[in-house]
Image (tube, rainbow, N blue to C red):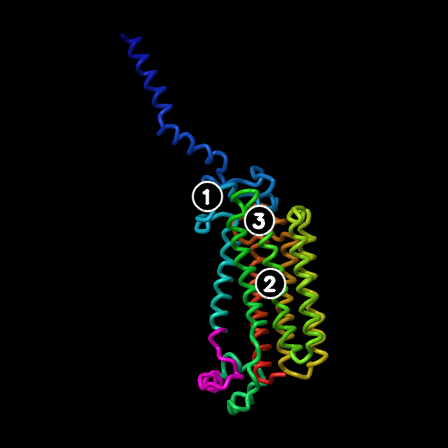
Amino acid sequence: MCYTASLTMASSTVKLENSPAMQFLISSREPLTKTHNSISSPELTDYDSLPEFLKHNEFILSYYRSEWPLRKTILSIFSLHNETVNVWTHLIGFIIFFLLSLYAASISPLGTTNSSSTHFAASNSSTYYSFVPANRTVIETEPETLPPAITRWPFYVYLAGAMFCLLMSSACHLLSCHSARTCYLMFRLDYAGISALIVSSFYPLVYYSFTCNPFFRQLYLSSITVFGSAAVAVSLVPVFDTPQFRPFRAVLFACMGASGVVPIGHKMMAFGHRPEAVLTTGYEAVMLTFYGIGVMVYATRVPERWLPGKFDLAGHSHQLFHVLVVAGAYTHYLASLVYLGWREAEGC
């Protein structure tokens, strides 16, 4: 009888161990053992456990998402991992530029002769156009004597380029952990976004500085557009995305941005006596400083290089790079307002 009871108990134990509930409890404990240092999700992993396509920075040691299902990957925008700050810094930047675009589109050009434009010029001279010296005399001018409205498409090209860059960057950092194919695609869109931001930044600068000189206007705009297209083509090569090519990527995009020194210098030679030229050049110097520091931080991977694992969630180089990009892009937005106000006030 005791023997029968023992067999019964053993059979019950085997059934219990093989039950779905027990298997769930056993399986739910395994990831916790593997990733005991992950505080936000039992499925986060460390650098050494990653597939090769996700190994981009050996100084970020933990809190990685690896080959998650697409739905879970998308929803991870609301969870804590080592890409959370990267996703949100540029997503918030995108929202900021979207709102700035709506604001800019709502402003009537100074060159129009309708009453709403005249009212705007008279009542809002302390905001949008007030820091453009040329408008201090124009805002009191009769509508019939204002210059024809200047085209705004170069200004909107810049806003679109900035929004595309920020949105693609945010999407890349959110989705690239899903699969190797998704990672490849998202990083190409990310690099295309960087090129779009750099190229589009030239459009307000060049178009409004050389409105009255079509030859140099076309020369500079076509040159930077070809340069940017070539950079996108180079980024399609798979080796371009490897960690070993990080310095090359930094140098390539830095050279694209630094080429803006040529039209800026030309502008100062032609219009250095104008306060608008001096003001926009000041903004552009600040912008280049933000971008320059960002590229250096990106290429050197400071500060996580000095203290591996200490900046996994917040404070690592790519997050700092993102903040500096948004700051630089906003600074150039301010410069673009000056360019636009200058030409709308004076024409050619």
Magenta region: 105-124
Image quadrant for the C terminus? Answer: bottom right
Q: Which label is found at residue 329?
A: none
- Asked if the residues shown at circle 3 and circle 1 are in contact, with their CB atoms under 8 angstroms apart, the answer is no
The picture places residue 318, in percent across and down from the top left corner, at: 58, 54
252 lies left or right of 186:
right
Q: Report helix, strand or loop for mark 3.
A: helix
Q: Report helix, strand or loop for mark 1.
A: loop
**Spatial distance from mark 1 to mark 2, Cα to Cα?**
36 Å
Q: Which label is found at residue 197?
A: 2
Q: Report helix, strand or loop for mark 2.
A: helix
Q: What residue type is labelled 1?
A: Ile
Q: Name the residue under label 3.
A: 185
**Mark 1 or 2: the one toward you:** 2
336 in magenta: no
**Mark 3 or 1: the one toward you:** 3
- Residue farthest left in this picture: 1
149 lies left or right of 77:
right
